Amino acid sequence: MRLVKDAWELGELGEAVDATVLGFEDGIREWEQVLRYGERWLEGTFFRRARAMGNDIGYDSIVAGGPHATTLHWIDNTGPVRPGDLILCDMGVENRNLYTADVTRTMPVSGSFTPLQRDLYTLVYDAQEASIAALAPGRPFLAGHDAAMEVLAHGLADLDLLPVPVEEALDPSSKVYARWTLHGVSHMLGMDVHDCGQAAPESYRDGILAENMVLTVEPGLYFQADDLLVPEELRGIGIRIEDDVVVTADGVRNLSAALPRDVAGVEEWMGRLRG
Ligand code: GLY
Ligand code: MN
């Protein structure tokens, strides 16, 4: 019953996402303090917004500067925030009726991406775009995941990282690219951040999307700091972009669209809010 949301539930999720957008914006506005105090300042700033506008946070905030972003659930949030690095923030407000958002943005600490960061970020962005375009009622839940992996695997092949041809890597018996993509691209969202986790596979993971399901779209690329299979300049870079979408009659609507996602949008947004 919880897989498909009714109109009231969609309103609750929209409210949680809107408060989450404000929490991200608060963090950028306090960038001087972020640079001074590190990841902790962003975690605390987001929590203040969650308490003021909602009820709580839906899960432990992940605020991951530099190589911490390659740890999927970096929740210590004790590290520095250094110009030149990227910072990955995965945070969601849980509203007073316990519906939660789940949003990730990866930002250049200095306000602009380096050429390498821009290329990798664009690859993840393209994967997310392909994933979003693959979602609609009647499509398999996994269509979005598969679309993102197709883009990421080709990107990793272009970087000369795959030990086999890309078509072989994409075969379910290989998935050799998964060393750098690490996780599934979508999960249901609602009262739990991983909503309906106990649902039968035939109605969820192996099931078909229906109008008013709400799910995340969150591809990522992660190069561990000690990964000797990638060139040194890639090591310690982690990027994820995560939005919350509701399935509509003919596609999806992005509930978290108010937070910029593309390179130019993220840079403009940071420049504007940091003042
Ligand atoms: N936001 C954390 C997760 O989806 O696992
Ligand atoms: Mn998520």
Image (tube, grey):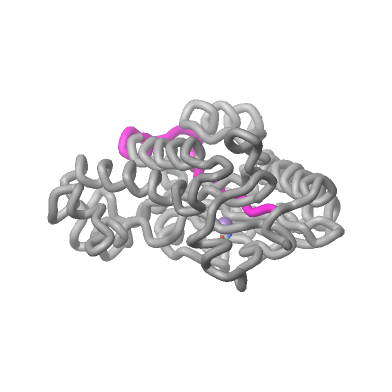
Left-right relation of 171 to 128 = left
Q: Is residue 31 above or below residue 97?
A: above
The quarter of the picture where the N terminus appears is bottom right
Residues shaded magenta:
101-118
Residue 28 falls in image quadrant: top right
Residue 47 falls in image quadrant: bottom right
Q: Is residue 68 above or below residue 135?
A: below
Q: Is residue 84 above or below residue 58?
A: above
The x, y position of residue 236, in whole percent, is 34, 56
Asked whether residue 41 is in view, the answer is: no
Q: Nearer the viewer, residue 63 or 8?
A: 8
Q: Nearer the viewer, residue 27 or 176?
A: 176
Residue in the image at 40% along x and 53% along y: 238
- In the image as oriented, which residue stretches furthest toward the bottom? 198
Is 230 colored magenta in this rendering?
A: no
The x, y position of residue 126, in whole percent, is 40, 36
Residue 270 falls in image quadrant: top right
Is 113 colored magenta in this rendering?
A: yes
Left-right relation of 195 to 221 = right
Residue in the image at 77% along x and 47% along y: 10
